[in-house]
Structure formats: C-alpha cells, structure tokens
Image (cartoon, rainbow, N blue to C red):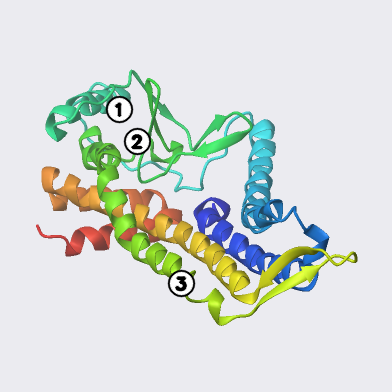
Amino acid sequence: MVWERSKTKTMLLLGVATAIPVTVAVFWFFLAFAPWIFSGRRNPILFLPILAFFIPAYLFVRLGTRKYRREWEARGSLPIRATSPIPLPIESSYENEDQGILAVVSALPDKLRFISNNPRKVAWQTMIQQGRGFLTVPSDGCLFLGDTVYFAENMKGRLSPDEWKPIIASVLIFPTLKRELATRLLLILLPILAAYITAWFFIPPLFPTITHYSPQGQPVSFSNDGWIVMIIVGFAIMFLSIAIGIINVGKVRLLADTKAAEIFGTEVFINSLNKLREASPSDTLGIEKRLRNLSISPR
C-alpha cells in the first residue's frame, strides 16, 4: 500500500512545506509590519506554525483512515496487502503455526535475558482498529498488544515459527534500547540547542530595536528583526528535530536487528528476511535496508 509505506515521509514533507510559509508570514507580517494588531496577545500566534506543521499530517491520516474504513465496511474485514496467491510451503515441528509462535515467544525472554509479558493469542491481520483509526501491523515484524501478538495477514504460512525467532527477537529488543536512542538524540540535539541559545545573545544586538507607539503616544510594543530571525530558526530546529528523531528511531531499529543476529546468527536472520521479501514485494525497500545492515554487521 503506497499510502502506508510513504505515510511518515509524506506527513513530514507536507508539514514542513506548510509550516515554513506560515512561519514567515506570521513573524514578518504580524510582528514586523503590523505589530500593534496583536499587541499584548502575541503568544497564541506562536502556535500557528506548529499547527501548520501538524494539520496536513492529521488530514492526510484522516483521509487514509476513511479510505480503509470504507474498504473494511464493504469487505467485512480489514484490508490486506496484495500478495502472491499461493503461500510458500513451510516445515514445522509444532502442531500448528499459532502454537509454534507462542512457544517461540515464551522462550525468547530467557534467551534475551529480560522479562516479557507472554501473549496468549496470535492474530493475523494487516491493520488493528483502535478507536476511530487503524494501527498498521508491519509485514516484516509484529506488534504486542495486551495478551495478543499480531502479525500481518499476508504473512500467515510464510515462515515457520523458528524462522520468526530473529524477527520477533528484534521487536522485543527494540524497547530495551531506549537509552541508546536517547543518547543518540542528545549527542545531536544538545550542541544545536546550545548554539541556538548562545545565538540569542549575539544575533538580536546586531539589529535595531524599534519601539511602536499607540495613537495616544504610549509605547505599546517593541520589535527587533533579530528576534524574528531567531524565532524562525527556532521553529526550523523544531522541525529538524522531528526528522532527526525519525531517522534515529530507524537506526536503533537496525541496531536491534544486529543484536538479534548476534543471538540467532546473521545467516538465519537474513534467510528469514529474504522469505519476508518474497512474500511481501511491497516492503522490499525496508527489508533491503535491514538486509544491508546485517550484511555489513560483524558476523
């Protein structure tokens, strides 16, 4: 599904494309050319660029959700991705696929050396309805919600429970890497924020501060082009931080893959990913990124 695969990137691009002109308009028109209009009420205006960033993403998700809801109501089930018509044959020592996966999941915490809530059910569906929207189940992973572990519907019968082991392990390892993710973000963002705060002491003094008077001759506001520049830069840093966060979440997910490969073997993990790629061609780009990561990781 194109909408699903490009959702994050598209929402980010739409938000930035909308927020930048709104930011410029707000701070150059309302605060530079007509500061008296919002004299004493400027703070609410500062949220306009933030709203401009998130509103296109909200509308984009709503439109996609409505599309899927119509398909779901028409079909009587959640929409699924296009797949090859015949599942790939698998061999398994378990009685059935679901019991095998539950056995694999229950054994993983000891292997990974951390405690995890053992699910009691396995569900195969591409999307999970939550409130008025849907939560996508990735074809190259799974979701743990409550007492159920969810797998994409088009993956049923594609891998044996043992072949799911490194995939599931990577999903379970990822939440344990929160400290790694926080460290990555701090190392990138702290210098940027420090430079931004320092710039507030040097940039505004380079511009003259203008006092605006009311018709009665009372000073009502002050403006400085340096303040406007710094505020615009501040919003740019905020939008950049979102992009940096998304990129680093992806990198930490790849790190989870690497750690899972260290436990179960790189070749085993690569074999499982190759089978997922064959079963779900629409996810080729994401799976190939994971394969490249494992190929360059130490074996």
Residue for point 62% across, 62% down: 14
Q: Secondary structure at mark 2?
A: loop
Where is residue 153 shown, x and y percent of the image? 45, 36
Q: CA distance from mark 2 to mark 3?
A: 58 Å
Name above or below for residue 229 compared with residue 159. Answer: below
| Residue annotated with mark 2 | 157
**Residue name at image x 51 percent, y 54 percent:** 8
Q: Which label is found at residue 199?
A: 3
Q: Nearer the viewer, residue 256 or 138?
A: 256
Pinpoint residue 190: horizontal percent, then vertical percent. Answer: 35, 60
Residue 158, by quadrant, is top left
Residue nearer the viewer, 40 or 158: 40
Q: Nearer the viewer, mark 3 or mark 1?
A: 3
Neighbour tally class for label 2: few under 14, some 14-19, many 20 plus, Cα within 10 Å: some
* Residue 43 in view in this figure: yes
Q: Which residue is mark 1?
A: 97
Q: Is residue 161 left or right of residue 191?
A: left
The dot on residue 107 is none
First in residue order: circle 2 vs circle 3? 2
Q: Is residue 197 above or below residue 226?
A: above
Q: What's the residue type where badge 2 is placed?
A: Gly
- Residue furthest out toward the top: 120
Q: Are marks 3 and 1 in contact (CB under 8 Å)?
A: no
Q: Position of residue 266 (x, y in %)?
A: 15, 52
* Amino acid type, label 3: Ala
Q: In 3D space, how far apart are the residues under numbered discs 2 and 1 (Cα atoms)? A: 7 Å
Q: Determine the residue located farthest toward the front in the rendered image.
A: 217
Q: Which amino acid is tagged 1?
A: Glu
The mark nearer the N terminus, 3 or 1, is 1
Looking at the rendered image, the quarter that the C terminus falls into is bottom left
